[in-house]
Image (cartoon, rainbow, N blue to C red):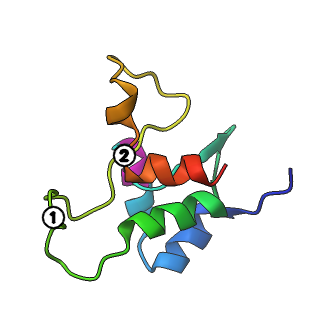
């Protein structure tokens, strides 16, 4: 498997946001999925692109039936979830986009 990964610095430059914002998103379980390899953080390009697809908007108004203005929070691998949710509720737009890219 030969997947391209981005560093935190590369992703911050791509989105023109601070690295501190990416760090905060990771602690809050926001943002794209990431890999934690020792003390290194990497973002797979496919996860970044899937996150961008979900974040893509044509208006600042919420879509019908939804009042979210940002991509859904995602559960990062390796972090325990205290109470499991039924499968149909856990496959939100971002998780569903990831499932179709596998």
Residue at the spot of label 1: 64
Residue 58 placement, left or right of 77: left
Find residue 82 and report its image quarter: top left
Residue 51 placement, left or right of 21: right
Residue at the spot of label 2: 92
The chief SS type of the magenta part is helix
Residue 4 placement, left or right of 17: right
User: Where does residue 23 sit, x and y in percent of width and height?
Assistant: 44, 53
What is the magenta range?
23-27
Question: Depth check: 40 or 58 in front?
Answer: 58
User: Where does residue 94 sit, x and y in percent of width and height?
Assistant: 43, 53
Q: Dot 1 lies on which element?
A: loop
Q: Residue 7 shows which numbered tag? A: none
Q: Give me the residue at 48% from left, 28% from top.
A: 79
* Residue neighbourhood size for the residue with mark 2, other residues' Cα within 10 Å, grouped as few (<14), some (14–19), many (≥20): some
Find residue 88 and report its image quarter: top left
First in residue order: circle 1 vs circle 2: 1
Q: Give me the residue at 28% from left, 82% from top.
A: 58
Q: Dot 2 lies on which element?
A: loop
Residue 60 placement, left or right of 51: left
State the separation of the CA atoms marked 1 and 2: 15 Å
Look at the picture and state if 87 lies above or below 59: above
Single out the mark in the foreground, 1 or 2: 1
Look at the picture and state if 75 lies above or below 57: above
In the displayed orientation, state which residue is furthest to the right. Answer: 1
């Amino acid at each position: 498997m030969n997947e391209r990964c981005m560093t935190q610095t590369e992703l911050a430059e791509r989105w023109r946001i601070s690295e501190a914002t990416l760090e905060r998103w990771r602690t809050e379980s926001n943002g794209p999925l990431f890999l934690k390899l020792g003390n290194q953080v990497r973002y797979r390009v496919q996860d970044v692109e899937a996150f961008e697809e979900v974040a893509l908007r044509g208006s600042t108004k919420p879509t019908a039936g939804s009042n979210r203005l940002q991509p859904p929070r995602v559960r990062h691998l390796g972090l325990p979830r205290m109470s499991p949710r039924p499968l149909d509720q856990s496959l939100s737009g971002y998780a569903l986009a990831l499932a179709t890219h596998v």
